[in-house]
Amino acid sequence: MKKTLLLTASLLLAGCAGTQTLPDPQIKTGEDYLPPITVMVDSLEHSSKLRNYLRESGVFSKVDTGTAGEGETQVMVKLDAQRKVAPMPLVFLSAATLFLLPIQNDMDTKADFTVMRDGKVLNRYHYENYMAKYSWLLDLGIPEREENIRRVARAFARDMQVTGLAGKPLEAQR
């Protein structure tokens, strides 16, 4: 009886895996780096994470912050990452059951990337990723939230690698 109770309790307290709607992009390794880019993100909370994930992708030779100089590639990112928590009645119900009832903890991310050079828009990219997870009170879901933004950054890096847009001269892109 004790083993069954222990097994049941451990299964209930183990937590739930998060699901992502954006598949994990496959980036080609061993290829030449794209020229440096300068990234400006409108989200103070997630801007450093997004730039770090772009650096981590290994696609660009350098990822800077700020404004780009003449002839350099500038990426403007409008990032909207909204965390959605369960309604308070469900949180109270979970607390009343001593947190054996998991609560929903979602994150909806929308990102618009605008690639520019010398004030001219070269291309626009739009990505959406929705993360759904059921979690316990002490499970904050931080790895899943970071994975949410990492997938968006890797999808952009993959698309830039496929198009090679950052490396083409401005005249050849017309």
Image (spheres, rainbow, N blue to C red):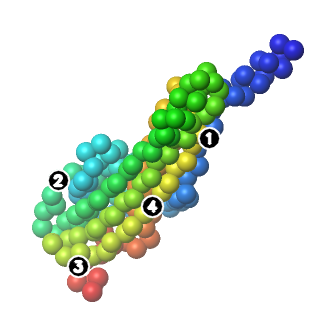
Indicate the amino acid at tag 1: Ala
Name the foreground residue: 113 vs 172: 113
Identity, as a three-letter code, of the amino acid under mark 3: Leu
Q: Position of residue 68 (x, y in %)?
A: 16, 61
* Relative horizontal placement of residue 96, taking residue 27 as reference (left or right): right
Q: Nearer the viewer, residue 31 or 148?
A: 148
Mark 2 lies on residue: 66
Q: Position of residue 168 (x, y in %)?
A: 30, 75
Which element carries disc 2, helix, strand or loop? loop
Residue kind at label 4, given as amino acid type: Glu
Q: Judge left or right: residue 111 versus residue 136.
A: left
Contact, CB < 8 Å: mark 3 with mark 2? no
Query: CA separation, marks 3 and 4?
Result: 29 Å
Q: Amino acid at mark 2?
A: Gly
State left or right for residue 59 relative to residue 48.
right
Residue matched to label 3: 170
| Up-down relation of residue 4 to residue 68 (above or below) | above
Res 17 label: 1
Q: Which residue is mark 4?
A: 128
User: Who comes first in sequence, dot 1 or dot 4?
Assistant: 1
Q: CA distance from mark 1 to mark 4?
A: 20 Å
Q: Residue at x 33, y 72 (%)?
A: 124
